[in-house]
């Protein structure tokens, strides 16, 4: 249960990223979203690598060998696929497809790679949470532009890449590598990949106090700290369950939008928030088997 709470805590921190960016950079329309994301990943990846430096070798040498290199490329690829999808489909659809497909891809990969068939309760809770996420995100969308198929495919690619690097991290952690070091290797390598993209997209906004402050918050808190918590959660939480729990992120972002930015939730979005909460509670509750195991271990 502690692992599940660590995952939820990570999702809460991820959910603060949008509000932080809006508060610090809302008045500066010249900052490209991809530049903000690249700065977040570069700073967060370097902080993670430095913080876990003494343990990185154990993660690099863990089995399956070389898997973390592919996972690092997936971390960087997820950022690029997501922003390319948003550019073609809009924020609401791009976010919904990438976030909503992540748990489905994760369950499928865990089944394919580890031969662990997802539980029926997980499937039902995930379906409920994804439906709630869809209603929450799409219920607050504005406008009715045409959605490009290429954008949806890119969003699906983003969901797959997210599932891939999460499943890979969980497998390496299960093999005995320290969770912090696993995240340090993945995000440290991804930071190197994203550095040229950050320089290409423009770094002038980082020279302003507000820009530097938001970049440090996004990198240190919503990336480095959050993924340390996420890694802790993956030690004891089934990977499919963990990814479903991260759907708390859009709920937190929506509530912060109301509380901090003065936004309003439509009745449809409020209903979606309730569905999402029900799904997360359902997937987070321990099973009878887990209860029996906990009782046996304490006796």
Image (tube, rainbow, N blue to C red):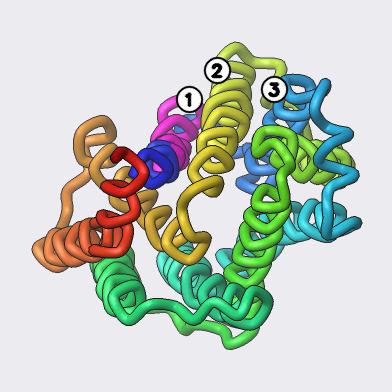
Label 1, label 2: how many angstroms apart (C-alpha)? 5 Å
Task: Residue under label 3, please give it.
Answer: 206
Over which residues does the magenta segment extend? 10-25
241 left or right, relative to 46: left
- Mark seen at residue 210: 2
The answer to whether residue 284 shows anywhere in this view is yes
Judged by its main secondary structure, the magenta piece is helix
- Mark seen at residue 24: 1
**Mark 1 secondary-structure assignment:** helix
**Mark 3 secondary-structure assignment:** helix
Q: Nearer the viewer, residue 131 or 292?
A: 292
The x and y percentages for residue 93 are 44, 72
Figure quadrant of residue 129? bottom left
Q: Nearer the viewer, residue 154 or 76?
A: 76
Label 1, label 3: how many angstroms apart (C-alpha)? 11 Å
The x and y percentages for residue 54 are 82, 21
């Amino acid at each position: 249960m502690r692992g599940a709470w660590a995952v939820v805590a990570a999702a809460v921190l991820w959910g603060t990223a949008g509000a932080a960016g809006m508060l610090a950079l809302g008045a500066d329309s010249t900052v490209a979203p991809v530049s903000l994301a690249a700065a977040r990943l570069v700073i967060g990846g370097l902080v993670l690598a430095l913080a876990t430096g003494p343990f990185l070798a154990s993660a690099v040498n863990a089995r399956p060998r070389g898997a973390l290199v592919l996972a690092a490329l997936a971390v960087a690829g997820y950022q690029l696929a997501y922003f390319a999808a948003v550019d073609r489909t809009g924020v609401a659809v791009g976010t919904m497809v990438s976030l909503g497909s992540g748990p489905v891809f994760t369950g499928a990969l865990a089944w394919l790679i580890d031969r662990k068939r997802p539980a029926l309760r997980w499937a039902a809770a995930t379906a409920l949470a994804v439906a709630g996420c869809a209603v929450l995100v799409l219920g607050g969308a504005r406008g009715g532009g045409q959605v490009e198929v290429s954008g949806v495919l890119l969003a699906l690619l983003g969901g797959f890449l997210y599932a891939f690097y999460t499943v890979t991290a969980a497998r390496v952690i299960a093999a005995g590598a320290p969770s912090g070091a696993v995240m340090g290797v993945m995000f440290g390598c991804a930071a190197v990949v994203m550095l040229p993209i950050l320089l290409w997209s423009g770094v002038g906004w980082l020279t302003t106090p507000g820009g530097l402050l938001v970049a440090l918050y996004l990198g240190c808190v919503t990336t480095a700290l959050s993924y340390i918590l996420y890694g802790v959660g993956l030690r004891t939480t089934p990977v499919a369950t963990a990814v479903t729990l991260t759907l708390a992120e859009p709920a937190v972002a929506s509530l912060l939008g109301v509380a901090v930015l003065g936004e309003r939730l439509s009745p449809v979005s409020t209903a979606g928030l309730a569905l999402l909460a029900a799904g997360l509670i359902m997937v987070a509750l321990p099973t009878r088997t887990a209860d029996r195991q906990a009782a046996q271990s304490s006796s």
